Image (cartoon, helix red, strand yellow):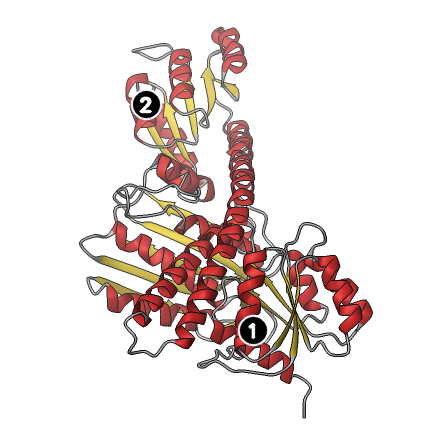
Amino acid sequence: MIEAQKKRSIQDSPTILIIDDDPGTCETLTYILKGKEYLPSSFSNGKDAIKAVQDGFVNLALIDLKLPDMPGIDVLAKIKELSPDTESVIITAYASLDTAVQAMHDAAFSYVTKPIDMEYLLVIIAKALEKQKLQIEHKQLQAQLIQAQKMEAIGTLAGGIAHDFNNILAVIQGNAQLISMDLDPVNPHYELVKEIENRVKAGANLTKQLLGFARGGTYEVRPIELNTVVRESSTTFGRAKKEITIHRKLQEDLPPIEADTGQIEQVLMNLYVNTAYAMPSGGDLYLETRVVANKDTQDKPFSVEPGNHVLLSVADTGVGMDKETRERIFDPFFTTRKMGRGTGLGLASVYGIIKAHKGYIEVESEKGRGTTFKIYFPVSEKEVAKPAKIADKVIKGTETILLVDDEAPVLKVGARVLSTLGYTVLEAKSGQEAVDIYKTNKNKIDLVILDMIMPDMGGGKVYDLLKGINPDIKVLLCSGYSIDGRSTEILEHGCNGFIQKPFDVKNLSGIIREILEEGKT
């Protein structure tokens, strides 16, 4: 609660305590400060003033050195102990000037003498508040930097785990789908195999959450209409959670953002689940989208990309969070739920996905007063793209494909899948072997399926060498990771597509045919 008050007071009207036992001084200062749009409160003794600091954040305290119940210097010390960010200005008579100077050495920003020069006092107050603002907009940036470094370190580890796990899942899924393709649906083993496939998909969804925050990767970024994603995802959520009333305030003619639709859906569903957990007996969910001008994001405690942004706000009337929880919600594997009820990956993946889309997220929450997530995406100048086609059946072919992967089990099952689809398959278990095979067989290889992460020679280097041999080569990238910076660069320079491991046979067959049919009349 104190942190929320602190943030609001910095952005809006600062709160000022007047601690003086002279009614005339308090009345005059209150009148003048209100005229300058400050929020003053006056106290005639130190005890009541200290309690006010305990109850809520105070920007500035004007403290008379001589108070009836305790020395003003003690009040100053106690306020600093309770609220280190609160600035203080000492009010003193000339006789106590030495004490006032000493107070500045201890904690006070400055002092003024009685009778008070009001113009001088207002200058001192403005300077004190400016110092406070700079020290707090600094602490926030420092905390954000520490958070980013922590996420980067954990993310690198989690990304490697997710990559290896996806390779394992690729082998399981590939073999399961090979079996199911040969089984009649009435076979008693058919449903067992399908259950294996479903569990693989569940595992793949888990690794997608890991990858969401782990490496800042994206999948298929294109200009999309955020309102459509919000409307469709919230409708689906509303059907499952009828005890939650959903309110939408979506700006008409909202400009597009450049994003991967699936990942934005993942962000929203994770936030919805978080909302449902915060409102176990039901409540209200408020969804809002609107354009935010560049100038309106300049006071944020993070570095903002130039240009306008689309703001997505997700607010609930749930239980809210205390300061300690709020500071940890984006940490991987942190959860407030009971054992077995949550992985602690939902909000961590939200953070990573938004970061990967060059966006920003902030959270406002108080215990018992609900939670609001505000997400900022850069506005795109491009037109909304048509949705990608998804294959609804296995499509076969007869061309020759070079499959490149350093993981022997992945290479083996991949070759079997492609052969089952009717293709002639050449296998390469390293980058250098792929280059050698392509040099020898370039006239009969129609497509290369290239793994991005290999120890001897990465997919990026292999792609460059293959492109040098044949500028018209057709390449489908695949990886246990999501698309990273190098993958994006390759895709932008002529690579024909990307597929995430573990891949579904239908989708793989459709993407292969789409690439091979490109340019044909």
| In the image: residue 54, left or right of residue 214 | left
Q: Quadrant of residue 47?
A: top left
Q: Secondary structure at mark 2?
A: helix
Mark carried by residue 49: 2
- Which image quarter is the C terminus in? bottom right
Q: Secondary structure at mark 1?
A: helix
In the rendered image, the vertical position of residue 303 relative to residue 434, given as above or below = above
Tell me the amino acid under the disc marked 2. Ala
| In the image: residue 445, left or right of residue 505 | right
Q: Position of residue 513 (x, y in %)?
A: 58, 81
In the rendered image, the vertical position of residue 271 relative to residue 447, given as above or below = above
Camera-nearest residue between 339 and 446: 446
| In the image: residue 59, left or right of residue 419 | left
Q: Position of residue 29 (x, y in %)?
A: 40, 29
Instruction: Report the residue that reaches farthest toward the left.
Output: 281
**x 52%, y 7%: residue:** 98
Disc 1 residue crowd, few under 14, some 14–19, many 20+, Cα 10 Å: many
| In the image: residue 43, left or right of residue 212 | left
Instruction: Report the residue that reaches farthest toward the right.
Output: 468
Q: Earlier in the sequence, mark 1 or mark 2?
A: 2
Q: Quadrant of residue 153?
A: top right
